[in-house]
Image (tube, rainbow, N blue to C red):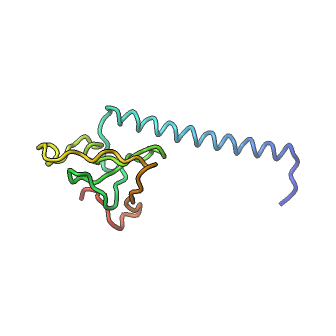
Amino acid sequence: MADLTEQQEDVILEQAENIRNARANRAREAERKVDARLVGGPGFTPAELVYASHTRCRCGAGMAYPKGIGGRGMWQCSSVLERSPSERAAKGRDLHTEAMPFVFWSVHAERNDGTGPTTRPA
């Protein structure tokens, strides 16, 4: 690789910083949109959720989180996220499992390729 001048290096570093900032802004915007839906927007569709491979809510639904939630997200009952309470929860037989923040809980997610175990509804 050819030697770069200090000015060329500065240009490259500035471009890299601009790319990092743009990515961070896109991530913040995605998190903002997810947060807005969590506090009263329409429910999420199963395609918009990442489901746990094995962990289920006390109501029987799989635990999940919305795609794009970011690192401060949490596992929650998928039926709550979808705004469609499970039959057992609707009858008042079971309460939902408390939300499980990522920073405190390690839950294995389903695989992206569609293989392996999942709590996603069939």
Q: Position of residue 4 (x, y in %)?
A: 86, 51
Q: Residue at x 36, y 67 (%)?
A: 115
Q: Residue at x 81, y 43 (%)?
A: 10
Q: Residue 118 appears in which quarter of the rendering?
A: bottom left
Relative to 87, residue 40 above or below: above
Work out which quarter of the rendered image holds the N terminus and state it: bottom right
Q: Position of residue 42 (x, y in %)?
A: 30, 35
Task: State how many labels appear.
Answer: 0
What residue occupies the far front of the structure in this picture?
104
Relative to 64, residue 113 above or below: below
Most foreground residue, 51 or 8: 51
Residue 27 visible, this angle: yes
Q: Position of residue 80 (x, y in %)?
A: 26, 43
Q: Is residue 115 left or right of residue 62?
A: right
Q: Is residue 19 left or right of residue 77?
A: right
Q: Is residue 59 left or right of residue 102?
A: left
Q: Position of residue 60 (x, y in %)?
A: 21, 54
Residue 48 visible, this angle: no
What residue occupies the far bottom of the structure in this picture?
116
Q: Residue at x 25, y 56 (%)?
A: 121
Q: Residue at x 41, y 53 (%)?
A: 105
Work out which quarter of the rendered image holds the C terminus and state it: bottom left
